[in-house]
Image: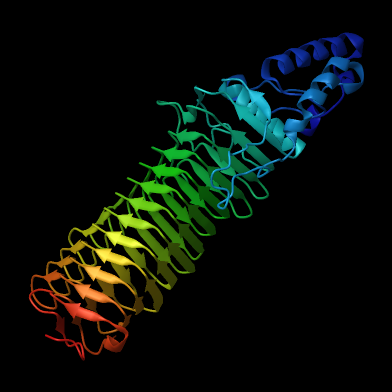
C-alpha cells in the first residue's frame, strides 16, 4: 500500500543536498528497471521490506522526463487492442507493447505497485525467466493486489512461481475494480488455505487468461487453480494439476466464467467438481476439453450448482469420482450442445456420464454420451429432474446395477427426440432405459427415437419401448 507520507516532495528530507541524492537514486532505478517514475511511491518489494520510496521531483530532472516520454505509451491500458478474436483465424496475434520488466521478482512487484498507482499499465516480462516469489507481501498474495487495468505479457518460458519452502500464499488477487490480463504466462506453485490456489478474483474484478497455463497450485478452500467471484475469461489456455480441499479442483466460480478453446485437465477436488464447479453464477464453455479430472467425493468433470450454464462443442472425457464421473446439473439450468461425454467413471456410486438433480432443467442436443460407467445405477445418465435429449446418441455405457444407458428415478421427467439408445449394458435390468415409476419417460418414437441392442433388455417400465 502507498502511504500518504511517502507522496511528498524531496524538501521533507531537507534542502538541495537531499533533493540531489533522491534524483540520483530515482534515475538509477529507472535505468535498471526500465520504468518511468513519477510522483507516486512504490511499495517495498519482497526483498526490500522496510524500505519505502518517496516521490520524484519532476521539476528538477530532465532525464526522468525524457525517460517517461519514452515509456509512457506502455503505461496505458491497451489490453485488447489488436487482440486476436474468434473470427480472426489466420491473422497474427498482436499483443500490446509495454514497459520491460527485467527477470527479477522484486522489480515485478515494484512495477505492479507503480501501475496500480498510475491507473494501469502494460508490462512486458522477460522471456525464459522465472519470477520467483518468496514472501507474502499483500494479504496472502505474492504479488500486489490488482486494482487497475494491468496486462502482463510473457514470452517463451515466462513463469511466475511461488518458491518452495517459503510461507504459503497465492500468486495474485484481482481486487474490486482491478482488470488483469495474462498473456503467454505460466502461473504455478501457489498454496493457501483460502480460496484460489493461484488466482483469486474478487467481486467487481476481472481476469483475462490468454495462451497461459495455471498449474500445480493448491488450496485448502475452493478453486485449486482459480477462484472467481467476479468475471473470468479463459481463452487458448490450460488449467491443470491443481488441487482444492473443497470444490473446484481446477476452477471454482460464483460469477461469470467463460472458457473458450481451453483445456481443464488433471485437477483434483476434495469435495465436488474436480475440473470446474460453478455455483450460482453463469458458466459458458465452448470448444474446450475437460479431461482426466478427479473428485474425491463427487463430480469428476463439471458441476453446475444453480445459476445457468451453456456448454458447446466441448469434450468431457476420462473424469472420475466415487459418484457422477462426468457432468452434474445440480439445480439451475444447463444446456449441452454438440458435447461429447465419454469414458467417465463413477467408481462406487451412480451416474458415470451425466446426472440431473431435482428441480433442474437440462437440455442435451446433437451430443454423444458414450462408454461411461457407474458402479451403481445409470451408466450413461441418471435423471432426478427434467431432461430433454434431442438428436443425441447414448451408446455403450455400463451400469453395475440398473439403467445401463439411462436411469430415470421416480422424480424424473425424461423426453427423447430423434435419440438413439443403443448397445448399453446393465448388470441387473434396464440395459437401455430403466424407469422408476412414477417417473415419466416420453420416447417420441415418431421423431426417430430408437432403443435397441441393449443388454440384458432395452427398457423397464417405459411406455412404447420394446423389451
Residue at image position (58%, 55%) is 230
Outermost residue toward the top in this view: 17
From the viewer's perspective, tell me whether residue 241 is left or right of residue 120: left
Residue 272, by quadrant, is: bottom left
Observer-nearest of 58 and 416: 416
Q: Position of residue 218 (x, y in %)?
A: 39, 41
Residue drawn at point x = 35 percent, y = 56 percent: 315
Q: Which corner quadrant of the image does residue 338 belong to?
A: bottom left
Quadrant of the drawing holding the C terminus: bottom left
Q: Is residue 465 visible to the viewer in this orientation of the structure?
A: yes
Q: Position of residue 238 (x, y in %)?
A: 43, 43
Q: Is residue 231 left or right of residue 446?
A: right
* For residue 332, above or below residue 211: below
Q: Residue at x 68, y 15 (%)?
A: 32
**Residue 408 locus on image (x, y percent):** 25, 79
Q: Is residue 139 visible in this depiction of the protein? A: no
At which x and y percent is residue 356? 33, 72
What sort of colour scheme is used for the picture? rainbow
- Compared with 242, 9 (above or below) is above
Report whether 240 appears left or right of 42.
left
Q: Residue at x 91, y 16 (%)?
A: 60
Q: Which quadrant, please, contains the N terminus?
A: top right
Amino acid at each position: 500500500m502507498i502511504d500518504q507520507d511517502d507522496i511528498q516532495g524531496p524538501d521533507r528530507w531537507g534542502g538541495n543536498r537531499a533533493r540531489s541524492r533522491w534524483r540520483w537514486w530515482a534515475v538509477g532505478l529507472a535505468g535498471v528497471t526500465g520504468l518511468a517514475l513519477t510522483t507516486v511511491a512504490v511499495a517495498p518489494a519482497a526483498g526490500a521490506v522496510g524500505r519505502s520510496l518517496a516521490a520524484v521531483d519532476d521539476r528538477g530532472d530532465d532525464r526522468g522526463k525524457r525517460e517517461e516520454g519514452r515509456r509512457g505509451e506502455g503505461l496505458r491500458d491497451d489490453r485488447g487492442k489488436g487482440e486476436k478474436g474468434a473470427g480472426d483465424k489466420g491473422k497474427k496475434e498482436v499483443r500490446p507493447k509495454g514497459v520491460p520488466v527485467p527477470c527479477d521478482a522484486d522489480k515485478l512487484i515494484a512495477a505492479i505497485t507503480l501501475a496500480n498507482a498510475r491507473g494501469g499499465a502494460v508490462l512486458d516480462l522477460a522471456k525464459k525467466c522465472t519470477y520467483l516469489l518468496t514472501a507474502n507481501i499483500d494479504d496472502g498474495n505474492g504479488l500486489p493486489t490488482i486494482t487497475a487495468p494491468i496486462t502482463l505479457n510473457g514470452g517463451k518460458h515466462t513463469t511466475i512461481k511461488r518458491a518452495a519452502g517459503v510461507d504459503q500464499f497465492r500468486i495474485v488477487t484481482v481486487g474490486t475494480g482491478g482488470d488483469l490480463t495474462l498473456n503467454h504466462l505460466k502461473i504455478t506453485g501457489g498454496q493457501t488455505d483460502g480460496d484460489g490456489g493461484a488466482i483469486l478474483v474478487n467481486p467487481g474484478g476481472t481476469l483475462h487468461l490468454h495462451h497461459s497455463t495455471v498449474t500445480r497450485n493448491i488450496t485448502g478452500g475452493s478453486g485449486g487453480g482459480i477462484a472467481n467471484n467476479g468475471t473470468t475469461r479463459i481463452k487458448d489456455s490450460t488449467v491443470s494439476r491443481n488441487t482444492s480441499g473443497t470444490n473446484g479442483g481446477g476452477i471454482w466460480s460464483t460469477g461469470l466464467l467463460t472458457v473458450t478453446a481451453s483445456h481443464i485437465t488433471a485437477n483434483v477436488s476434495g469435495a465436488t467438481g474436480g475440473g470446474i464447479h460453478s455455483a450460482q453464477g453463469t458458466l459458458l464453455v465452448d470448444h474446450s476439453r475437460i479431461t482426466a479430472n478427479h473428485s474425491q467425493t463427487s463430480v469428476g468433470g463439471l458441476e453446475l450448482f444453480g445459476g445457468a450454464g451453456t456448454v458447446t462443442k466441448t469434450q468431457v472425457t476420462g473424469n472420475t469420482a466415487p459418484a457422477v464421473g462426468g457432468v452434474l446439473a445440480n439445480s439451475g439450468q444447463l444446456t449441452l450442445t454438440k458435447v461429447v461425454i465419454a469414458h467417465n467413471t463413477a467408481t462406487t456410486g451412480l451416474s458415470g456420464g451425466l446426472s440431473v438433480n431435482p428441480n433442474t432443467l437440462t437440455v442435451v442436443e446433437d451430443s454423444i454420451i458414450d462408454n461411461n460407467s457407474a458402479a451403481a445405477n445409470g451408466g450413461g445418465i441418471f435423471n432426478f429432474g427434467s431432461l430433454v435429449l434431442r438428436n443425441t446418441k447414448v451408446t455403450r455405457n455400463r451400469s453395475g446395477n440398473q439403467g445401463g444407458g439411462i436411469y430415470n428415478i421416480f422424480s424424473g421427467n425424461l423426453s427423447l427426440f430423434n435419440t438413439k439408445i443403443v448397445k448399453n449394458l446393465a448388470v441387473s435390468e434396464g440395459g437401455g432405459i430403466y424407469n422408476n415409476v412414477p417417473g415419466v419417460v416420453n420416447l417420441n418414437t415418431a421423431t426417430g427415437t430408437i432403443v435397441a441392442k441393449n443388454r440384458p433388455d432395452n427398457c423397464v417400465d417405459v411406455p412404447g419401448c420394446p423389451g
